[in-house]
Image: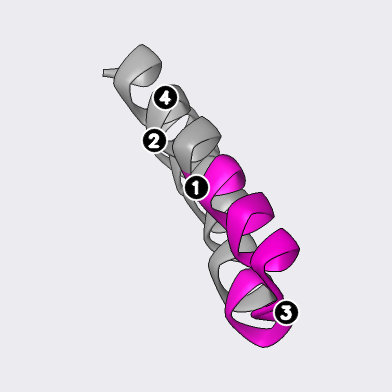
């Protein structure tokens, strides 16, 4: 599960970089905020036990 989520985070970062380089800066920033949110949610679930 963790490896799948980390792959999702990595793909989000790649998509954000693509959008930024394409010139859609606001969309890139919006998408970029998803990665730390998912990582924070993973930490929450890890330490909830």
* Residue appearing at x 38%, y 13% in the figure: 3
Of mark 4 and mark 1, the one earlier in the sequence is 4
Q: Which residue is mark 4?
A: 7
Q: Position of residue 10 (x, y in %)?
A: 53, 32
Q: Which residue is mark 2?
A: 8
Q: Which mark is residue 28?
A: none
Judge depth for marks 3 and 1 and give the one in front.
3
Nearest the viewer among 47 and 28 is 28
Residue holding disc 3: 25
Per the rendered image, the range of residues in magenta is: 12-28
Q: Secondary structure at mark 2?
A: helix
Q: Residues within 10 Å of mark 2 (few under 14, many from 20)?
A: some
Q: Is residue 20 left or right of residue 2?
A: right
- Residue farthest bottom in this picture: 26
Tag 2–tag 4 contact (CB < 8 Å): yes
Q: Residue at x 58, y 41 (%)?
A: 14
Give me the C-alpha separation between circle 3 and circle 2.
Answer: 21 Å
Mark 4 Cα shell of 10 Å, populated few (<14), some (14-19), many (≥20): few
């Amino acid at each position: 599960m963790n490896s799948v989520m980390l792959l999702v985070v990595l793909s989000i970062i790649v998509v954000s970089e693509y959008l930024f380089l394409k010139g859609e800066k606001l969309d890139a920033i919006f998408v970029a905020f998803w990665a730390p949110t998912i990582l924070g949610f993973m930490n929450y679930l890890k330490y909830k036990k």
